[in-house]
Structures are given as C-alpha cells and as structure tokens.
C-alpha cells in the first residue's frame, strides 16, 4: 500500500507579507507626494519631519532636565548633559593668589576696589544656595526642578525659568502666569533683595507664531511676560531701583538653536548682573559688608 504524501512545507515568507509590504510602500510614496505638493513653511516642515522620524523610530527619545544647583556651584554647559562635579575649595573663588593670607576666598577681601572681584563669585554661589533653599519649601519642587536653570555667566548669575513639555510657566499666548510660576518668583524676591546687584529680566519665546487680528506678536508677548515677572518680584520684596531693565526678545535668542520650536525656548531669564560696585566719595565700597546669607 502506497504511503500518502505529507503536508507541503512552504519555505520563505508568507505570500501576504509581500502584499502588505507593497501596500506600505505605496502609502509612504503617497504621503511623500502629499508633502511635496503642499505649501510648506519652516514651522510646518519641521513638525512633519519630526513626526515622520518618530513614526519610523529614527528619532531617539530624549528627556531634557534642568538644574537648580550642583554642590553650591551654579554651572551649566549643556542642559541635556549634566554631570556631578566636585565641590570647589575656597581657593577656587579667588582670581589671584594672596600669599599674605591663609585663606584665598571672600575672607581675603579687604574691600579695596582692586580686590572687590574676589567676593563676587562667592556672593553668586551663596545666592544660588539661598534660592535653592527657598525653592525647596515649595510642594512641587521635584517637578519644578526641570523648569529651573541656574548658571554663572560673564555677565552675572543667570536664573532661567523655562517651559517643558507638559508644564508651562504662562498660560498659552498670554502674560498670565501659572500658580507655580508665581510661587517661584515670590520665593526669589527676598533673596534678590538682599543682594546689592541689579537685575535684568528678559522674556523669550519659541518660533511658534501668534495669530491675532490686532497684530499682537511675540515681541509684545515676551515683553509683557518679562514685565509681569518684574511686577511679581516687586510685589514680594524686590526694590524697584534694583531693576536694571525689562526686555522682550521674542524668538531671537533661542535656548536650543537647532530646534527653535522646542518648548524650552519659552522662558524668563532673570540675570543678577556682575557689575563693579559703586564707590562713595571716600573711596570705600557702598554696601561692602552686605552679602547674601543662605536662608534658614
């Protein structure tokens, strides 16, 4: 008796895979043609390109984090690449060596005009520490820490309150701050008021345009937001004579130039200016003994 034939084993991919692959290729071509024939602008092109990269798994997922302070030293080289650094010694706050003194930091400052610069970095470090302590009293500080960047620049100590995806500082398209933004500014005012330095407040936005019939644009919006920040600081203790300027920069100075539509480009910058201290007629420094102290 002849044996029956066994089941036929098909090698390779199933036939439906070929049909499915052809369908996907046609869909990709269809969407490419739609994009090619449509009227494009820079904003639309960047949004579509980002969506296609995410859909095909090309774009990596990145979580951008801010910082309040690292070990008492406000330093930020790159927002997305932060690393712990060693706590600097007291000698790191001095620009020149003082062989006649046992200490090289602010303790070596004799309040002469030539040596006044020694105390400035130390004062900024203490101000950053005081801001951190004040902000830690807020119940949402763990979430808000990604919205805060503190860095020391040649112009002074720069505190930036930035938007992150899912947490903005102001209501969209307005100068009305959210409750957490107001709380951050209210905690800053007493610390800034203890310092002799003047403050420069600047508003920034991303490249997303505002569509309003009255012509209200990004310049007006960023200026109004900066002025709102000034008003809140003034209402909670910052003297008006410490305000050096209030400026709106629109989208001209993005925090991330490679992606001008990123939410983090929307921010308020509060710069504690690094200025030469004033001199009275006797040649002494005004406010020589006035230094900011960390809050209890």
Image: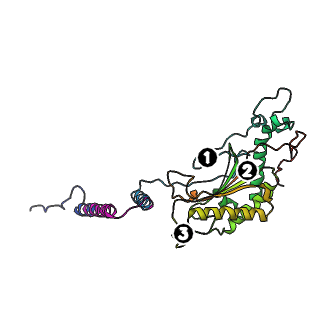
Q: CA distance from mark 2 to mark 1?
A: 23 Å
Q: Is residue 209 magenta?
A: no
The quarter of the picture where residue 32 lies is bottom left
In the rendering, at what x and y percent does residue 228 appear?
69, 65
124, above or below 270, in the image: above
| Distance between the alpha carbons at the discs numbered 1 and 3 | 40 Å
Horizontal side of residue 76 vs 212, given as left or right: right
252 shown above or below 182: above
**Front residue of this view, candidates 218 and 283:** 283
Q: Which residues are magenta?
A: 22-43
Residue 51's disc number: none
Question: Which is nearer the N-term, disc 1 or disc 3?
Answer: 1
Residue 215 - label: 3
Expressed as whole percent of the image width and height from the top left, the position of residue 290 reads 86, 47
Residue where numbered disc 1 is placed? 82
In which quadrant will I find the C terminus? bottom right
What residue is at 32 percent from the left and 60 percent from the top?
36
Snapshot quadrant of residue 121: top right
Residue at the far bottom: name it: 213
Work out which residue is located at the far top of the displayed protein and give it. 99
Magenta: main secondary structure equals helix
Mark sitting earlier along the chain (3/2):
3
| Mark 1, other Cα within 10 Å: few <14 / some 14–19 / many ≥20 | some
Q: Could you say whether the residue bearing mark 2 is in a helix, strand or loop? A: strand
Q: CA distance from mark 3 to mark 2?
A: 33 Å
Q: Is residue 216 above or below residue 109?
A: below
Whether residue 167 is visible to the viewer of this picture, yes or no, is: no
Q: Position of residue 3 (x, y in %)?
A: 12, 61
Residue labelled with disc 2? 272
Q: Would residue 278 appear left or right of 11 to someone viewing this image? A: right
Q: Above or below — where is 278 with respect to 250?
A: above
Scheme of colours in the image? rainbow
């Amino acid at each position: 008796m002849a044996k029956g034939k066994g089941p036929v084993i098909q090698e390779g991919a199933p036939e439906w895979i070929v049909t499915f692959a052809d369908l996907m290729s046609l869909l990709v071509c269809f969407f490419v043609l739609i994009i090619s024939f449509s009227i494009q602008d820079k904003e639309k092109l960047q949004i579509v390109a980002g969506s296609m990269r995410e859909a095909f798994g090309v774009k990596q997922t990145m979580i951008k984090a801010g910082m309040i302070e690292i070990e008492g030293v406000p330093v930020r080289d790159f927002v997305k690449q932060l690393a712990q650094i060693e706590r600097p010694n007291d000698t790191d706050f001095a620009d020149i060596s003082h062989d006649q003194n046992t200490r090289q930091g602010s303790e070596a400052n004799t309040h002469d005009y030539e040596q006044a610069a020694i105390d400035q970095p130390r004062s900024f470090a203490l101000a950053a520490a005081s801001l951190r302590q004040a902000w830690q009293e807020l119940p949402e500080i763990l979430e808000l820490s990604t919205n805060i960047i503190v860095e020391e620049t040649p112009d002074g100590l720069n505190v930036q309150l930035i938007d992150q995806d899912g947490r903005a500082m102001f209501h969209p398209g307005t100068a009305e701050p959210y409750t957490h933004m107001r709380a951050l500014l209210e905690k800053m005012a007493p610390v800034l008021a203890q310092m002799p330095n003047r403050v420069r407040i600047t508003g920034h936005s991303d490249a997303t345009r505002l569509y309003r019939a009255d012509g209200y644009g990004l310049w007006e919006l960023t200026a109004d937001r900066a002025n709102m920040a000034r008003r809140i600081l003034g209402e909670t203790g910052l003297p008006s004579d410490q305000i050096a300027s209030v400026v709106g920069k629109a989208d001209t100075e993005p925090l991330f130039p490679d992606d001008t539509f990123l939410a983090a480009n929307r921010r308020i910058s509060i710069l504690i200016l690094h200025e030469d201290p004033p001199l009275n007629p006797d040649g002494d420094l005004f406010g020589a003994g006035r230094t900011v102290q960390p809050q209890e």
